[in-house]
Amino acid sequence: MIAFIMRLKSRAHFTVGPQPGLRDATFIGTNARRRKQARQRLAILIGLFLVAYLALGARLLQYGLTEPLQSAAIDASAHAVASRPDLTDRNGLLLATDLNTVSLYAEPRRILDADEVVEKLALVVPNLDWRETHRKLRSDSAFQWLRRQLTPKQQADILALGLPGIGFRPEKRRFYPGGATAAHIVGHVNVDNQGLAGMERYLDQQGLADLRAAGLTNDTRLEPVKLSIDLRVQNIVREVVAKAMVDYGAEAAGAVILDVETGEVLAMASVPDYDPNEPSRRLADGSIDKDYEKGWFNRISNATFEMGSTFKSFTLAMGLDEGKITLNSVVDASRPIRMGGFTIRDFKGKNRPLSIPEVFQYSSNIGTAAVADMVGVDNHRQFFTQLGLLSRLETEMPGVATPTQPRNWKKINSVTISFGHGVSTTPLQTAAAAAALMNGGHLIPPTFLPRSRDAAQSLATRVLKDTTSADMRALYDRNGQIGSGRHAQVEGFLVGGKTGTAEKVINGRYSKTSNFNSFLAAFPMDKPRYIVLSIIDAPRTGENGGRTAASNAAPMIKAIIQRAAPLLGVQPRFADASSDRRLIDY
């Protein structure tokens, strides 16, 4: 009976419950109770949705009213997107700029199938290291770089794969429109846009790296930095030295053009070189191409050489400045000098007394050594130090080499150094010292940034008398007309200069079969404005089969001046054929 009553109760549409104040039971409808509970639950749900929407709305309003951040403090190790200033030449032509790009990364903890991800990425990313990529994807880390600086097409193709746990991060990529044209001047950056060489590294040393670390360069457009070089002239110089290295079968070659009045470097090239857009290359087996990376070596400022007979310019200038000789002086070069077990001879010597202009013209080792002996060892060393030939060059270019010299100068050292053996210095500081011979006697530190004449004069140090500079201009001009310098002569531009053919030092000994050749030129000789120095390392041949500087280093100068002089604003001057060709009185 009880079970029957309970079944009836369960089927009923009402319940029985007590009603306060009433003696009898009250019948409550089940549907009405359920409707009441539903309204209560719906009200609670609506309240929760309202609270959520209000929170979202307040957050959006906060974002809308907040000023956008221009920079943020980001740790340098976080690979933050950082800008670098554009680099331009003296005329505003672009040398280096930033490009926006993306890099590929993975979140290994979200990778479901590492094998599938590697297989699909290999279809898009060239030369993907399967083993290394698989190791990164199976690691327990939260973040792993897979490939830096992708192309837009590669990014689109990877997006189409729809791989979970794979993402992209915006970055900056440095781009060099001229490629290898000014590689050793501009330098290059690493994958994190940090300067590693050349003027790129100089910028970081001047505080750009600190600004980057503070996050103050992120997405900020920086003012361009103008360099002193002329890109048109730079291209000519680089083409000439690259061609000479091939034509003369040399190991290396280089050249630099310097403004004698301001110290500005107008062009500088050293080959072999490299493309700063691709500072490193990998071989087919995946290893680094070491031969390609040899192109990083800048022989004009980062290497020292025995500059050979170009040093006779400085020795004769020393004798003139000390008053030991004049252009009318005569020295005995009739027989070799024997000293300390060494015999000093002239190459194709005249075996007779020579005037000072003849010592320069015939590049007499004996005559130059006699001048050094007149000055003395201590004064010789002091004079070369004063010219900046024995100390490290101060300029913006990082990695400048330090010259080498004997620890203790003896008489034999002074004699050999007088004609360019026994001291090694950089070609750039050799050119800077030569500029002092041409500009009236002022040593001006070379610069890769624009510099006015007034600014240059404030930095200049007088190292020669005006009269000594005038005498050296006369010697250079004469040698350019009737001496070894005639191989560099360009009609109308009055080129003067001095050859330097030095036996190359190999394994600590002078080689009889390998030379380091150079030519030190100035033009126009009626009022010198530019120094041009060329070098060529271990040439196997030259013009007419010769291996001396007159056969290869001098023709390089001629090719450079022929093309570059008009761009530098030098007007050609032609003397009347019936008149004396010399424009300077000696």
Image: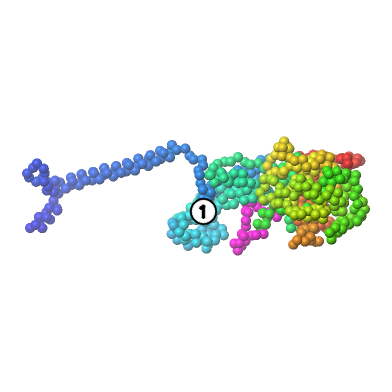
Q: In front here: 418 or 33?
A: 418
Q: Main secondary structure of the magenta part?
A: loop
Question: Which residue shows up at 15% across the image and 46% down it?
Answer: 29
In front here: 227 or 319?
319
**Picture coordinates of residue 128 (x, y %)?**
55, 59
Instruction: Please say which color scheme the image uses.
Output: rainbow
Q: Note whether 408 is above or below 227 in the view shown.
A: below
Residue at 90% x, 44% y: name it: 328
Q: Say which residue label 1 marks.
A: 104
Residue 534 in view (yes/no)? yes
Give the quarter of the figure containing the C terminus.
Answer: top right
Per the rendered image, the range of residues in magenta is 272-291
Choose top left, top right, bottom left or bottom right for residue 327: top right
Q: Residue at x 82, y 55 (%)?
A: 412
Residue type at the position of mark 1: Leu
In this rendered view, identify the residue nearer to me: 319 or 7: 319
Q: Position of residue 44 (x, y in %)?
A: 27, 44
